[in-house]
Amino acid sequence: MCLALPAQILQIHPDDTGMATVSVDGVKVEVSLALVDDVKVGDYVLVHVGYALNKIDEDEAIKTLALFAEAGLTSAP
């Protein structure tokens, strides 16, 4: 099963690599921003296999993360 996770952008690398550091359930990971436009620090994106697929609404991201936690898929309360 393929699953994309909501993640919040913590830092966009200033070196023109198109990479960013995001937080997925409190874990920092590096992702490519090659598939999304107009994102900034603090935005939420859907992440799958190292790529941010699209920008999502903060409320939608928080609700989705809460459902993942309720289902025991994440460690968030």
Image (spheres, grey):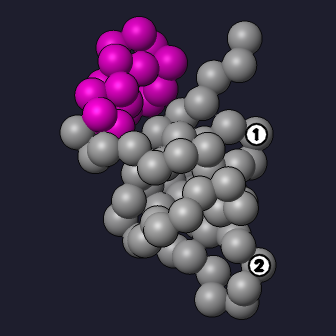
Q: Residue at x 62, y 50 (%)?
A: 52
Task: Tell me the amino acid under the disc marked 2.
Answer: Thr
Tell whether 68 sits left or right of 18: left
Q: Quadrant of the N terminus?
A: top right
Q: How many circles with numbers are drawn on the protein?
A: 2
Q: Is residue 30 visible?
A: no
Residue 68 visible, this orientation:
yes
Q: Residue 26 in the image: x percent, y percent?
A: 46, 49
Amino acid found under the numbered disc labelled 1: Val
Residue 20 percent coordinates (x, y): 62, 68
Mark 1: few/some/many CA within 10 Å (<14, 14-19, 20+): few
Secondary element at image label 1: loop
- View extreme (front): residue: 37
Residue at which label 2 appears: 17
**Vertical order, 46 against 52 (above or below):** above
Residue name at image x 69 percent, y 70 percent: 19
Q: Is residue 59 left or right of residue 57?
A: left
Magenta residue span = 60-77
27 vs 70, left or right, is: right
Asked if residue 35 is positioned above or below residue 42 in the image, the reply reads above
Q: Position of residue 30 (x, y in %)?
A: 68, 61
Specify whether residue 64 is painted magenta.
Answer: yes
| Contact check, label 1 and label 2, Cβ < 8 Å | no
Residue at the disc numbered 1:
49
User: Quick one: SS at disc 2?
Assistant: loop
- Quarter in which the C terminus is drawn: top left
Instruction: Please tell me which residue lies in front, 59 or 10.
Output: 59
Counting residues from the start of the chain, the first of labels 1 and 2 encountered is 2
| Secondary structure mostly seen in the magenta stretch | helix
- Residue 71 is a magenta residue: yes
> Crowding at label 2, few (<14), some or many (≥20) Cα neighbours within 10 Å?
few
Residue at point 63%, 23% (across, down):
3
